[in-house]
Structure formats: C-alpha cells, structure tokens
Image (cartoon, grey):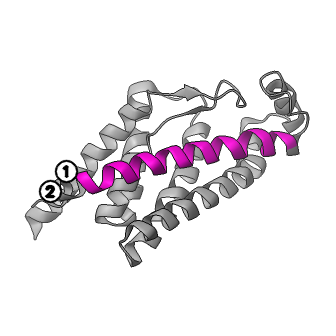
Amino acid sequence: MRNESLSRMIKVALLGAIAMILMFAKVPLPFAPPFMSVDIAEVPAIIAGFTFGPLYGFLVIVIKLILNLIVQGSSTGGIGEISNLVVSSAFVLTASFIYKRKRTLKSAIFALSTGVMLMTILAVISNYYVIFPLYGANMSDWAKIISKTNPLVNSVPTFLLFSIVPFNVVKGVLNAVVATTLYKPLRPVLNKK
C-alpha cells in the first residue's frame, strides 16, 4: 500500500513538471490582450484527476505553479498565479468530480464541458471582483488598453464578454480535447503498479 502511494505521488509530481513545461508553449489569440495566451498546461491535471481523483488533479496544478514560480518567477506579483490556480482548479476539480462518478466517454465529455462552463463563469467573476482590483487598475483603463487588440472591447462588460469569456472557452476546449485524446492511451501506464 505504501509503495502504491509513493508511486502515485511520483506520477503526480511528474505530471506537475510536465504541466509546468507546457506553460511555456503559449499561443496568443487575436481577440485577447498580449498578456493572455493559451496553453495546454491543464491537460496533465485533467489526466491526474481522471486517473487518481480530483485531489491529485489539484495537486498537479499546485506543483505546476510552484515550479513555474521557481523557474520563471512572477511578472504579476503572484496575482496571475492566483488567477490561474482559481480558474484551473474550477475546471479540473469539476471535471474530475463528475467523471469519478461514472467513467465513460460520454461522462468525460459532459464532465469536461461542465468544467469549461464553470471555469469561464468563475474567470469572469474572479477577474471582475478580485483579480483586476488586486492589480490596482481601473477597469475602464483595462478596457481601453484591450480595445487596441480587440475593437469589440469598449467597456468593462464588453471586455469580460469579448475577451475573458472566449479566451477561457478556447483554452478549456483545447485542454479538454487534448486530455480526452491522451487519457485512454496513458491510463494503463499511470495505473501500472
């Protein structure tokens, strides 16, 4: 039993390290400001959550962020990392809890879709009420800056609707598709004693 726990923790640590490496492969989106770029760093967390349970998916996210802080530091004073923790956790924990109840492809698709929706809603709420106030910036100023990248943005509501929402949907769907593709072939390797 102890060897099994140690083996699981090693696998989770490796998935966390892979997630941190995946954070470096960022792709900008035409409707999002330059500081928001898409990566597939939640894929290892989803795989861990589906394989071992929600807690392990969360641990992969935490490991990813700690390693990233060690390697790159923070250009946001930790605010970006807090946002990543909250939004990624909403996605991975939701999907993992739902999938844990019924382990079928249909359930996985439903779980990941629900996770993307919750992640997007939480991203809007957390950005509006917590993240941007932590930056100490006037939300109207943010909207003006982002309007240069996305002409649909001219106010705080349009910034949330035309930048934050589509960004999180694209990121969530991309991570969900990649995780769904990789989960089945990786599951036997991860479950191997």
Residue at the image position 66 percent from the left and 24 percent from the top: 34
Q: Which residue is mark 2?
A: 7
Q: Nearer the viewer, residue 157 or 141?
A: 157
SS under mark 1: helix
Q: Nearer the viewer, residue 136 or 94?
A: 94
- Quick check: 35 left or right of 163? left
Quadrant occupied by the C terminus: bottom left
Q: Is residue 129 above or below residue 73?
A: below
Q: Is residue 45 visible?
A: no
Q: Provide the residue span drawn in magenta.
A: 158-185
In x, y percent, where is residue 139?
A: 85, 38
Quadrant occupied by the N terminus: bottom left
In x, y percent, where is residue 144?
A: 87, 27
- Quick check: 37 left or right of 180? right
Q: Which residue is mark 1?
A: 10
Residue at the image position 24 percent from the left and 52 percent from the top: 185
In x, y percent, where is residue 41?
A: 43, 40
Rate crowding at label 2 as few (under 14), some (14 to 19) or many (20 or more) other CA atoms within 10 Å. Answer: some
Q: Is residue 81 above or below residue 74?
A: below
**What residue type is disc 1 on?**
Ile
**What residue type is disc 2 on?**
Ser
> Which label belongs to residue 187?
none
